[in-house]
Amino acid sequence: MPPLDTLRAFEAAARGGSFSAAASALNLTHGAISRQIAKLEHWLGLKVFERQARGVALTPEGQRLYLRTSEAFALIADTSERWTEQRGPAVVRLSSIPSVCGLWLMPRLKQLENGKPSLRITLSVEHRHVDLADEGIDLAIRCGRGAIPDRISLQLFEEQCYPIGSPELAREIDLHGNAARLLDQTLIHDSDATGWRSWFGALGLDFRPRAHDRRFEDYNLVLDAAMSGLGIALARPPLAESLVKQGKLVALDKRTVINPSSYWLDRPHGAMRDAARALARRIGREAGLSADIIAGFTGDAR
């Protein structure tokens, strides 16, 4: 691989059209740029520039090299920006899955950040369970069946699930009939159909996903599919409650069943930073938890 300093000089000269422009961009002398280009041409065994009276012009080989180097430097710059995150005592890194971020956190984000102290929340959106301490995550909200090792966990809320669909579909379905009538419809679920199994199971029916049912990886897409009339989804309050209140989705059966999975607030072991503690308190209040329960999670309980 050519020395990187020669490639930087080459890319700057090709972009600026002269060694002088490259020298100004890189805070080097004209002579230093000229030497770097000569070093690169010696390493490659070919010329990358044609020297002209005013500036330089790329040779065909230089043009091909410029396309590659500019692409590579752009990729590195983009990656560097992704690695550069806001830091400071008021910044809190919060990790969660897309559906929770979009449906529960976003409508509350301004309220969670405002207050005393004022906070800045940076969201890490992903499905995987990460090592919170290793990833520098202060808090995480996840959907699961209980506490997991190497974290301190607090149950935020459970879900009283019930079937929902588009208003058009609601006009076609008997809203008060036997639960078995819904098995004649296309059912929509995310990567885990446990909620549907629990709902039908509580009403004495056995449900197993069928070929004509629709499966999406994220609950946001489940709701989008239901609003588009593609089938019946399972409402998972509080994630779906806003769409139901707006009338974009309608309850197709009022009978509710507790989802075996619930929502948890997690943090790494050890003392919490003040900003993370403040955010945990605010999230707990939004979930309707008492101050004593929240204090037990943050380590403030006496």
Image (spheres, rainbow, N blue to C red):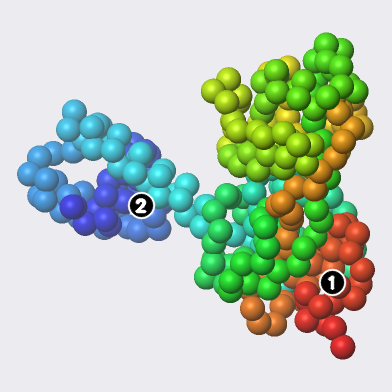
Distance from Cα at disc 2 to Cα at disc 1: 58 Å
Farthest-out residue, front = 204
Q: How packed is label 1: few (under 14 Cα within 10 Å), some, or many (20 or more)? A: many
Could you say which is closer to the camera, residue 40 or residue 108? 108
Residue at image position (81%, 56%) is 157
Residue at image position (80%, 27%) is 179
Considering only vertical position in the picture, is 90 above or below 1?
below
- The label shown at residue 243 is none
According to the image, label 1 marks what residue? 294
Considering only vertical position in the picture, is 217 above or below 172?
below
Residue 4, picture quadrant:
bottom left
Q: Amino acid at mark 2?
A: Ala
- Are the residues flagged by discs 2 and 1 in contact, CB closer than 8 Å? no
Could you say which is closer to the camera, residue 206 or residue 73? 206
- The label shown at residue 23 is 2
Helix, strand or loop for disc 1:
helix
Considering only vertical position in the picture, is 168 above or below 100?
above
Q: Is residue 160 left or right of residue 271?
A: right
Residue 241's spot in the image, x, y percent? 86, 38
Residue at image position (47%, 47%) is 78
Could you say which is closer to the camera, residue 83 or residue 195? 195
Q: State the quadrant of the C terminus.
A: bottom right
